[in-house]
């Protein structure tokens, strides 16, 4: 590990332990506020100072996510191997980091709706789920950063083998695909209106796809702009071709079944909006899974 990369790890860890305290503080504050806000209890003016502290804590948590993701992506580009833990950590870390923006929007909505006398239980539930994701992501990020520092690696001027990013890309694709399918299934089983789905699908879909797109961007930049010879070797090309064909064969019957459900009497108003996310995340899951399977043969 280079000195610069080690400095990045230490910087991220220093913010990590600080942001862990900040996350715990905000969680306690929100747990105390939740019953008071949902029951429309008049809040003491001293809560304004706690709100300022909570805002500072959100900034610390955001800095940690940004620093740690940059560090792990830099390590991914210079390491000689990867692991499922690293891929999972980067994926959840990016999603968790983007969810901080949703936290800010939720807290703003809760404040406005509380003043108007509107119920905010739904926003609170989403906020607590988001903080659960932050907690899981923070634990994984800290563990991965510590393991990277402790790992005995010999410095080398040789850039990462293409296979490491190739494996990381498709491992991330499987995770993002499963997360996206979980969201689609939840959308199919809920009674959300079509106008609400139109708002949720682009935002949530973009958040889930962002880790895969980030690693894909790094892979493309490395191959075409950093002096690595473009093009795939013969085995990679064959693996991708076979994976693409199998993905298509598996996807066609699934979409035919979904079309039948969509025009059936049991169809709900929002189902026609879910065909593209269903197609996209099934395709991503199948393609990445088959590619990794053929790659390991």
Image (cartoon, rainbow, N blue to C red):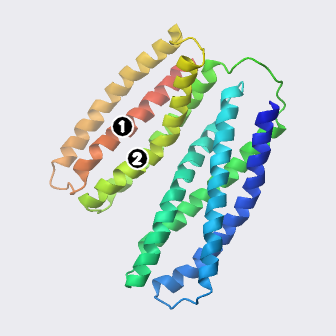
From the viewer's side, name the closer residue of 148 and 182.
148
Viewer-side residue, 32 vs 59: 59
* Residue 120 appears in view: no
Q: Would residue 122 be visible to someone looking at this image? A: yes
Q: Which residue is mark 1?
A: 280
The residue tagged 2 is 205
Left or right of 123 on screen, residue 58 = right
Q: Which mark is residue 107?
A: none
Residue lying at 51% horizontally and 19% vertically, measured from the top left: 294
Q: Are marks 1 and 2 in contact (CB under 8 Å)?
A: yes
Q: Quadrant of the N terminus?
A: top right
- The quadrant the C terminus occupies is top right
Please tell me whether mark 2 sits on a helix, a strand or a loop: helix
Residue sitting at 22 percent across and 48 percent down?
Answer: 272
In the picture as drawn, the residue positioned furthest to the top comes out as 234
Instruction: State the CA–CA distance, disc 1 to disc 2.
Output: 10 Å
Give the crowd class for mark 1: few <14, some 14-19, many >=20 residues within 10 Å.
some
Circle 2 Cα neighbour tier, 10 Å, few/some/many (<14 / 14–19 / ≥20): some
> Compared with residue 257, is residue 142 higher up or lower down, i.e. above or below?
below
Sequence-wise first label, 1 or 2: 2
The residue at the point 32 percent across, 61 percent down is 190
Q: Position of residue 149 (x, y in %)?
A: 81, 39
């Amino acid at each position: 590990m280079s000195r610069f990369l080690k400095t990045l790890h230490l910087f991220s860890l220093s913010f990590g332990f600080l942001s862990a305290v900040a996350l715990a503080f905000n969680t306690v504050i929100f747990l105390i506020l939740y019953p008071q806000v949902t029951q429309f209890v008049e809040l003491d003016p001293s809560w304004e100072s706690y709100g300022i502290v909570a805002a500072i804590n959100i900034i610390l948590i955001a800095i940690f996510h940004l620093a740690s993701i940059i560090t792990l992506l830099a390590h991914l580009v210079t390491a000689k191997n990867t692991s499922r833990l690293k891929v999972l950590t980067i994926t959840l870390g990016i999603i968790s980091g983007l969810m901080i923006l949703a936290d800010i929007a939720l807290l703003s909505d809760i404040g406005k709706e509380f003043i108007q006398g509107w119920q905010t239980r739904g926003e609170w539930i989403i906020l607590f789920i988001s903080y659960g994701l932050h907690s899981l992501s923070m634990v994984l990020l800290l563990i991965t950063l510590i393991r990277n520092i402790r790992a005995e690696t010999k410095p080398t001027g040789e850039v990462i083998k293409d296979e490491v990013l190739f494996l990381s890309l498709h491992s991330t694709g499987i995770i993002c695909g499963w997360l996206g399918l979980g969201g689609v299934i939840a959308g199919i089983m809920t009674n959300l209106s079509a106008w609400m789905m139109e708002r949720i699908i682009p935002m949530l879909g973009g958040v889930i796809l962002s880790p895969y797109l980030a690693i894909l961007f790094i892979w493309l930049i490395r191959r075409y702009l950093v002096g690595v010879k473009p093009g795939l070797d013969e085995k990679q090309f064959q693996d991708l071709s076979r994976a693409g064909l199998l993905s298509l064969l598996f996807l066609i019957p699934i979409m035919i079944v979904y079309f039948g459900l969509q025009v059936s009497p049991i169809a709900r108003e929002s189902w026609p909006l879910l065909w593209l996310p269903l197609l996209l995340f099934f395709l991503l899951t199948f393609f990445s899974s088959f590619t990794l399977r053929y790659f390991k043969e």
